[in-house]
């Protein structure tokens, strides 16, 4: 027996009956892997079944219009996933006659396919010798080898937990890469579970596991490295005229994409500096009043916001919308980064 054969036996006896596993063609594996990014398996199942009914082949997907694809994706979130999937389908339909390529180099060039997805397609559908690495595998490896390297959001170099995990499991691959890779994932999801005591009593890898032997399973993996948050000063100007406030839709890409906001300036400006800026723009202003100051914490950054209400008298030619209090609350979507300002205004 070997680690790989123990994993495969466990998988064959315990695997869940998931729709993409019933007929694991490259296209179905590809769609399922894209849907499963940042989404739970239970939530994905009905979407996957609807999607396959609408687009049974990659060529069907390639021929669909983007709005139909987006509608089928509605509620799954992270819409760049479906846009990229659709783009890739068109590329593959045009260049490959509807057949997904079976090499890493070709797959990784398609929009939205990263290292993990490319390896998952190659291992799960083409049975090629690859092992896709995710958080489940990193946790398994850290406990098997008592490796204290903290999981990083960055993949890192050869000493990162990500690389060491990939090397460890690839070296032990022996036989069917599809059952092996999916078996490792199942073990991580259902047996070697995170944040609590793993179910070692039913684990087929006990004999290989250093943390189990040393009764130290809860010490691994080490806590995640938290990226340092970048602090930014922002000055927000809320223009006001005739009972309405000036708002505008943010860019389609980037932070707070497509949500509504006010006019932002980088840096912290005081009332004199704001006065100068407004003067340069030839704006006729009756008053500039401080509304509030607050800190808003995002995942990777912090905004220190100073907000001002600028009452206008004359013309204002920027692109945007003049909205009253009611419509700001009911009609337009504002991110929580502006909630304090809205509370002040309404
Ligand atoms: Fe994880 Fe326990 Fe199995 Fe070790 S024995 S891999 S800690 S479940």
Image (tube, helix red, strand yellow):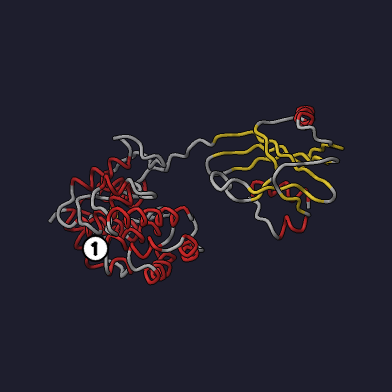
In the picture, the quarter occupied by the N terminus is bottom left
Within 8 Å of ligand 1, the CB of disc 1?
A: no
Exactly how many numbered labels are in the figure? 1
Q: Position of residue 88 (x, y in %)?
A: 37, 53
Question: For this rendering, which residue is in front, 55 or 296?
Answer: 55
**342 to 15, vertically: above or below:** above
Q: Does dot 1 land on a helix, a strand or a loop?
A: helix
Q: Which residue is mark 1?
A: 11
Please state if 64 lies on the left or on the right of 96 as rendered.
right
Question: For this rendering, which residue is in front, 64 or 238?
Answer: 64
**289 to 252, vertically: above or below:** above
Report crowding for label 1: few under 14, some 14 to 19, many 20 or more residues within 10 A (C-alpha).
many
Q: Position of residue 129 (x, y in %)?
A: 19, 50
Of the four image quadrants, the one with ligand 1 is bottom left
Q: Position of residue 18 (x, y in %)?
A: 33, 68
Q: Position of residue 305 (x, y in %)?
A: 68, 38
């Amino acid at each position: 027996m070997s680690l790989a054969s123990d994993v495969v036996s466990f998988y064959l006896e315990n695997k869940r009956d998931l729709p993409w596993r019933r007929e694991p063609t490259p296209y179905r594996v590809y769609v399922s892997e894209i849907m499963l990014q940042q989404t739970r398996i239970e939530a994905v199942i009905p979407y996957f079944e609807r999607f396959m009914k609408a687009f049974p082949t990659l060529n069907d997907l390639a021929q669909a219009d983007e709005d139909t694809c987006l509608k089928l994706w509605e509620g799954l979130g992270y819409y760049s996933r479906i846009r990229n999937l659709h783009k890739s389908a068109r590329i593959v339909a045009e260049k490959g006659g509807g057949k997904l390529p079976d090499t890493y180099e070709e797959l990784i060039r398609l929009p939205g396919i990263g290292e993990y997805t490319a390896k998952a397609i190659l291992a799960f559908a083409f049975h090629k010798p690859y092992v896709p690495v995710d958080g489940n595998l990193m946790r398994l490896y850290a406990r098997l080898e008592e490796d204290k390297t903290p999981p990083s959001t960055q993949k890192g170099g050869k000493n990162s937990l990500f690389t060491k995990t990939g090397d460890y499991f690839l070296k032990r691959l022996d036989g069917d890469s599809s059952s092996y890779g999916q078996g490792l994932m199942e073990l991580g999801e259902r047996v070697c579970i995170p944040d609590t005591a793993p179910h070692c009593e039913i684990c087929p890898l006990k004999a290989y596991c250093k943390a189990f032997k040393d009764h130290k399973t809860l010490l691994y993996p080490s806590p995640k490295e938290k990226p340092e948050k970048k602090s930014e000063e922002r000055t927000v100007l809320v223009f006001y005229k005739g009972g309405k406030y000036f708002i505008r839709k943010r860019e389609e890409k980037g932070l707070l994409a497509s949500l509504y906001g006010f006019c932002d300036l980088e840096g912290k400006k005081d009332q004199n500096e704001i006065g100068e800026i407004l003067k340069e723009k030839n704006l006729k202003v009756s008053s500039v009043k401080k509304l509030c100051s607050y800190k808003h914490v995002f995942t990777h950054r912090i905004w220190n916001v100073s907000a001002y209400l600028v009452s206008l008298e004359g013309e204002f030619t920027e692109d945007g919308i003049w909205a009253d209090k009611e419509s700001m609350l009911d009609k337009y979507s504002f991110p929580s980064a502006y909630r304090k300002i809205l509370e002040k205004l309404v």
